[in-house]
Amino acid sequence: MKVRQTHTSSQLTIWIVLVAMLAGFTLLGRELWQLQVKEQDGFEALFRNQSLRRVRLPAVRGKIFDRHDRCLADSTPNYSLAIYTHELRAPRSAVANVLEQLHEIWSRVGRPPNLTYPQIKQHMQQNPDKPLTLYHDLTDAEIKRWRTAFEEWTSPAPGSFRRQKIAGLNLGRPLEGRTIVLQTKALQNRRTSTAANTLELIYQISERLNKPRVIRFQQIKDHIFARRPLPLIAWDNLSEQELARWADRCSMLPGNDIVCIPARTYPFSEQTAHLLGYTMQADADNSPAEAGRVHYDLRGLKGRKGLENIYDDLLTGSYGYQLLQIDAAGFHHNTLQTTPPVAGGDLKLTLDAEIQRIATEALTTPLPNEKSQPIRGAVVVLDATNGDVLALVSAPTFDPNRYMNSTRYRQQLLTDSTARTFHRAIYGQYPPGSTFKPITALSALKQNSNAATETHHCHRTYRNSSGRPMRCWIHSQGGAHGPTTLQTALMQSCNIHMYEIAQAIGYEPIYQTARAFGLGQYAGLFPALDVPPTQPDVRYGNLPTTADNPTDLCNLSIGQGKLLTSPLQMAMVTAAIANGGTLYRPRLIKEFRSQTDQPFRPNPTWPIRRIDLDINHLEQVRQGMRDVVMHRNGTAQSAQVGSIPIAGKTGSAQYREKVGDTVEDRVHAWMISYAPYDFPRYAIAMIVENGISGGQTIGPRLAKLYRELFQYDGTLTGENG
């Protein structure tokens, strides 16, 4: 009876276990079905999302041409050597392990070790079990730095009390005297990281190309951590000789190849640097539109100054995209899809590269009596008939090709006392000096037609209505102009005559005439394209609205005091006088196109206003300006070129400059000019900072500019030269 009960109890236990197992298998099967069937689509989507990476590709930047289709800014092939790290994961290399540890120690000591890559290879081939001395002459400061860094390097990991071991280094003896020794035996069978293999490959290529390594080990690690699926650029701007050596010596090495990345170049370099500006690598796009959509941004170029910056949207083009498949380790596995970028649009300028060269050389070539120090100044050449900018020069200048590629060069320019990157032609603000006198003369003629024939006497000094004495420039030479008319006052640049007529007409007429010629206002050189231009009421320079006293009025009449203008503004004034009274917006963009397969679209000229002037009054001022250059008593006879009639007005704007502990009186030498006189084509403004006078400093330069300019356009021949 007892045996039967035991048997029944055993069967019951077995059945209970079977039911429990069946229930367990049922639940397990249900979960497997839930995961593998019902939620399959969700997991597939998650897998696809985790294994795909979207890369943004930059477009080739558009070109900038001059008016005769000479290329001023181009995108040229930049042949670079790329490392594909996903192909360098498998090799196990003791040399790579040694290099990795060497660079880790190097970063902590602060200077390169006392051995070379060939020495490391030789050691690992001949004496791999012996220690390798990395440093043998450490200074006290280096020893202190190394001990501190070693303590941090080997400090216990979070949650542990044991110091971390560093392969190849003795925890108890990181130093042996003044040497650091690496136990290379401990590195022979160690697993090699992808970063170490990449570093060794770069050393191999460096040795075979005979080209110094430029990329740091930390950059390699950062790339593998943050941009693992993408190629690592180890060298760029490879020459033809280096490309040939690579094909012969390196192309068989794994994980490297030559790629072509467009680079920006400026064929005319320093001559167009201020106008065109330059490009640098674009910042990462963190806009909401791109967030979560792009995993990697192969940042292209972005304009930082000049036209490159102002018209960056047109020149940049449209980005392309590439869809990459990565493996479980995050390395590139396959390229699934590519949408190519669309190249940027092009600009065609009104600038003439040859006239730009002529103007640059005329400004920057020292005269026989000048020091060889860099000339500081500017030249603007406009087409007097429509406001086209033919040349826009600022000096001293800089090399944008070097600027983009050399950190050291950029740092030098930051500390250069001559402000080489400052665009004086557009943004420089100077008192115009006597180049302002034609505006004073036109103001007087508008108020009093007899002002042309009225005579005033220059006795070197003049007392204004407040009794303050004011001098003519000729006072410093011990002379006087004597009786002057308006025309002879312009020719000889007499200050006293201008004081007299200014006191007679008051401040407001001069202010209104100056404003009509565009002074104190935005020039509008860089308008938006494909939009009817407007003339914004933006103050630029400084045109005081009132005179506080008679002295301010007299100073304004000769272009001194608080009045400030730019060389571009004075060129606009000159063009308006030359063409009969039409003030044009200076046009720099002649044509443009949004894509390279489209035709160029014109950017029209745009007159700002027709100045309210009597043509007879204007002609009287023009005759005075002609005499400035062509008359034997003119202040700019030095600007004559053969028998070609040239008009102009010199200026010597006084200013004060601190030199050391003293303040010195100095002069900006000015001249405005147009030519030929009867049928004006060119309107020019030129300034040299810290010059002598307009006639001595600018006149010879203007003659050089005109001579080459007239030879270039065919005006100057054997008969008139």
Image: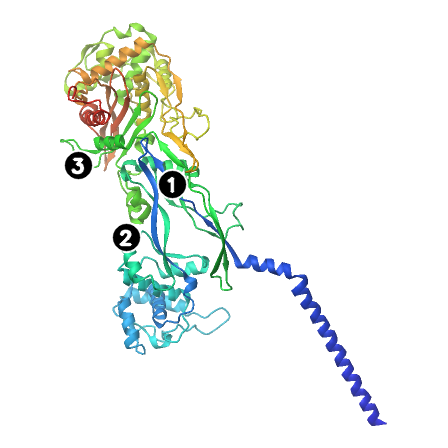
| Mark positioned earlier in the residue sequence (1 or 3) | 1
Q: Is residue 135 visible?
A: no
Q: Is residue 19 above or below residue 481?
A: below
Q: Which residue is mark 3?
A: 372
Q: In the rendered view of the protein, which quadrant contains the N terminus?
A: bottom right
Label 1 vs label 3, nearer the camera: 1
Q: In the rendering, at what x and y percent does residue 3 appear?
A: 82, 94
Residue 255, image x, y percentages: 39, 62
Report which quarter residue 109 is drawn in. bottom left
Mark 1 crowd level (few <14, some 14–19, many ≥20, 10 Å Cα):
some
Alpha carbons under labels 3 and 2: distance apart: 38 Å
The residue under label 1 is which amino acid type? Arg
Residue at image location 73% in from the left, 77% down from the top: 21
Q: Which amino acid type is shown beneath numbered disc 2?
A: Glu
Mark whose residue sits in front, 3 or 2: 2
Which residue matches tag 1? 304
Task: Look at the numbered disc 1 and give the secondary structure of its residue.
Answer: loop
Q: Is residue 158 left or right of residue 350?
A: right
Vertical order, 125 against 565 (above or below): below
Q: Which residue is mark 2?
A: 240
- Residue at (29% x, 77% y) in the render: 127
Q: Give the mark nearer the N terminus: 3 vs 2.
A: 2
Residue pushed farthest right? 1
Q: Is residue 552 above or below residue 113?
A: above
* Mark 2 to mark 1 CA distance (whole Å): 30 Å
Q: Is residue 525 above or below residue 246?
A: above
